[in-house]
Image (cartoon, rainbow, N blue to C red):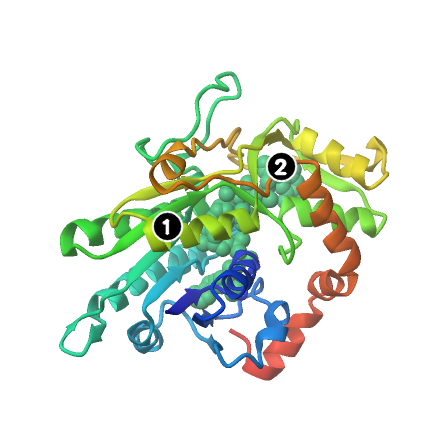
Amino acid sequence: MHLLITGGAGFIGTNFIRFVRRNRPGWKVTNLDVLSYSGNLENLRDLESDPRYTFVKGDICDAATVGPLVEKADGVIHMAAESHVDRSILDSRPFVVSNTLGTQTMLDACRRARRGDKPWPGRMVYVSTDEVYGSLPLERPEIRFREDMPLEPNSPYASSKAGGDLLVRAYFHTFGQNVVTTRCSNNFGPYQFPEKVIPLFVTNLLEGKQVPLYGDGKNVRDWIHVDDHAEAVLTVLERGQAGEVYNIGGNNERSNLELTHTILKLMGKGTESIRYVQDRLGHDRRYAIDGSKIERELGWKPTRSSWPEALEATIDWYRTNTEWWNRVKSGQYREYYDKQYGSR
Ligand code: NAD
Ligand code: DAU
């Protein structure tokens, strides 16, 4: 098996590639990543000498780059994206370009690719997000996102991802293409860019700073360990049904206040470390995943996401890998890439 992964130098991509290395050691992996601000090759440095691993710097919107890479692969995990909601509120254009146009480019590359005189036989898994469903009310805890719910994305990020979901649906319907979509909840684990709430809060506390909690802190997210997400995506690649959508969750709903208090406790800090700040514009109130379809149909459920153990292990990773996040927070790692590969 030769897998093409887009966005493999980001948080989930890094952990996914490491998961594949551990669990499918014979597979070849090609990682296509443009190395935007959140792509970091340092995460995968130990794989650089591995003959079954290849890195290609390139843009998913560039058909000339993507086409030959798809043709050589047997399957594609498409997860390259602009991923941060707050950035999409400041400037939505890069989100539409990478997340919607980039997904269209990937789909076309799979459609045009050939194996001899036959169509390309592979499958593309599109790694989408639960944010495409919009927001759930806090007052109705029994309601969770199901795959048959309408798409009601609220942020420019979520809308640009939903554009990808709709294109995947259309390419299945129109061309009968072998595509599957996953919609996962909030991931946590090692190598996450410290703009996202968990690594931001943990590294701020390690630096002796406060943590900026948006609004009243009552917003709820369903937290999943990144290795559970990786395993679920691999399951969908191997056993999912073409044209289907699979939700992936951690069965681990927490309010931001609860999350913050747990982090403070695990790190021996008090509530004086919380700074309440202005709320995010259009801040979705609650995300919660109904993961019964993937469990029923593919036999997968999360096993690594329970708290406080999984959160504590993640905090320990950031405590141990101070140099990694110091370089990321100071932007030093970018200077190195820009010199080596040229800036984007
Ligand atoms: P990330 O920002 O850490 O990584 C994204 C990667 O994509 C980076 O390496 C970046 O360089 C690359 N990239 C961006 N634009 C590109 C382009 N045009 N061409 C090639 N590469 C490009 O994000 P992440 O948190 O690892 O998220 C990965 C995927 O998973 C995204 O599609 C995101 O929507 C989805 N997702 C994330 C979460 C989460 O909690 N982080 C949850 C569900 C789904
Ligand atoms: O649900 C899946 C999504 O989870 C992914 O599709 C996105 O790529 C990923 O970024 C994440 O989106 P969120 O917006 O939920 O994650 P973020 O870490 O930015 O914020 C989590 C919650 O914490 C959210 O309610 C906002 C709040 N928050 C966030 C930051 C950065 C704060 O209170 N303070 C902060 O400084």
Q: Which residue is mark 2?
A: 306
Identified by mark 1, the residue type is Val
Measured as percent of width and height from the top left, residue 95 is found at 44, 55
Q: Nearer the viewer, residue 234 or 81?
A: 234
Identified by mark 2, the residue type is Ser
Residue at position x 27%, y 54% in the image: 179
Q: In the figure, residue 270 lies in which quadrant?
A: top right
User: Residue 213: which numbered mark, if any?
Assistant: none
Q: Nearer the viewer, residue 22 or 61?
A: 22
Q: Secondary structure at mark 1?
A: helix
Horizontally, is 69 left or right of 272 in the view? left
Horizontally, is 78 left or right of 279 in the view? left
Measured as percent of width and height from the top left, residue 244 is found at 28, 44
User: Residue 236: which numbered mark, if any?
Assistant: 1
Residue at position x 62%, y 34% in the image: 279
Tally of numbered tags: 2
Image quadrant where one finds the N terminus = bottom left
Measured as percent of width and height from the top left, residue 88 is found at 50, 50
* Chain-order first, disc 2 or disc 1: 1
Q: Name above or below for residue 185 compared with residue 22.
A: above
Direction top: furthest residue:
139
Measured as percent of width and height from the top left, residue 238 is found at 35, 55
Residue at position x 75%, y 41% in the image: 211
Horizontally, is 138 left or right of 76 in the view? right
